Image: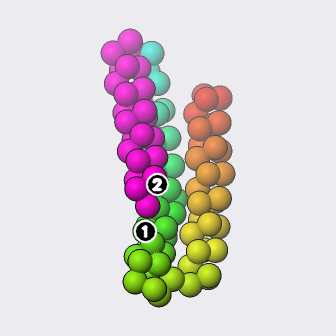
């Protein structure tokens, strides 16, 4: 679970630092990066929450295979969604 929180933190810091540097150079891409972050964040947060809930269940012996597969499915969906949003922003 720590790994997913660290990945989320790194993604947030990378997006924020890119937006700040773009705003300082005046390229106008900071708005694009902000929108990309706002569009990509909810599915990633949902997938992280699924893993967190499964991890709590695993810790207390109540984890299920369905919860694991759901977390895996949402991680896959989030990764695809982040790729789509990133690709669209890159094309803009």
Residue 57: image location, x then y, percent: 44, 81
Which quarter of the figure is the C terminus placed in? top right
Q: Residues within 10 Å of mark 1 (few under 14, many from 20)?
A: some
For residue 17: magenta?
yes
- Is 12 situated above or below 54? above
- Is 58 situated above or below 20? below
Residue 65: image location, x then y, percent: 62, 82
Q: Residues within 10 Å of mark 2 (few under 14, many from 20)?
A: some
Q: Which residues are magenta?
A: 1-26
In-front residue for pair 51/76: 51
In-front residue for pair 83/59: 59
- The residue shown at (33%, 15%) is 24
In this view of the protein, can residue 73 be seen by the observer? Answer: yes
In this view of the protein, can residue 34 be seen by the observer? Answer: no
Q: Which residue is mark 2?
A: 4
Q: CA distance from mark 2 to mark 1?
A: 9 Å
Q: Which mark is residue 52?
A: 1
- The residue shown at (38%, 12%) is 25
For residue 12: magenta?
yes
- The residue shown at (65%, 36%) is 87
The secondary structure that most of the magenta stretch takes on is helix
Q: Quadrant of residue 1?
A: bottom left
Apparent side of residue 27 relative to residue 85 in the rendered image (left or right):
left
- Is 88 situated above or below 68? above
Residues under numbered marks 2 and 1 in contact, where contact means CB atoms less than 8 Å apart: yes
- Say what secondary structure mark 2 lies in: helix
Q: Residue furthest top?
A: 25
In-front residue for pair 58/71: 58
Residue 83: image location, x then y, percent: 64, 43
């Amino acid at each position: 679970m720590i790994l997913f929180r660290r990945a989320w933190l790194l993604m947030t810091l990378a997006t924020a630092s890119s937006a700040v540097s773009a705003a300082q150079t005046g390229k106008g891409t900071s708005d694009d990066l902000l929108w990309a972050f706002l569009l990509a964040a909810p599915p990633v947060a949902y997938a992280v929450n699924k893993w967190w809930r499964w991890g709590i269940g695993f810790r207390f012996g109540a984890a299920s295979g369905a919860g694991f597969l759901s977390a895996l499915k949402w991680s896959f969906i989030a990764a695809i969604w982040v790729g789509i949003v990133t690709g669209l922003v890159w094309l803009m």
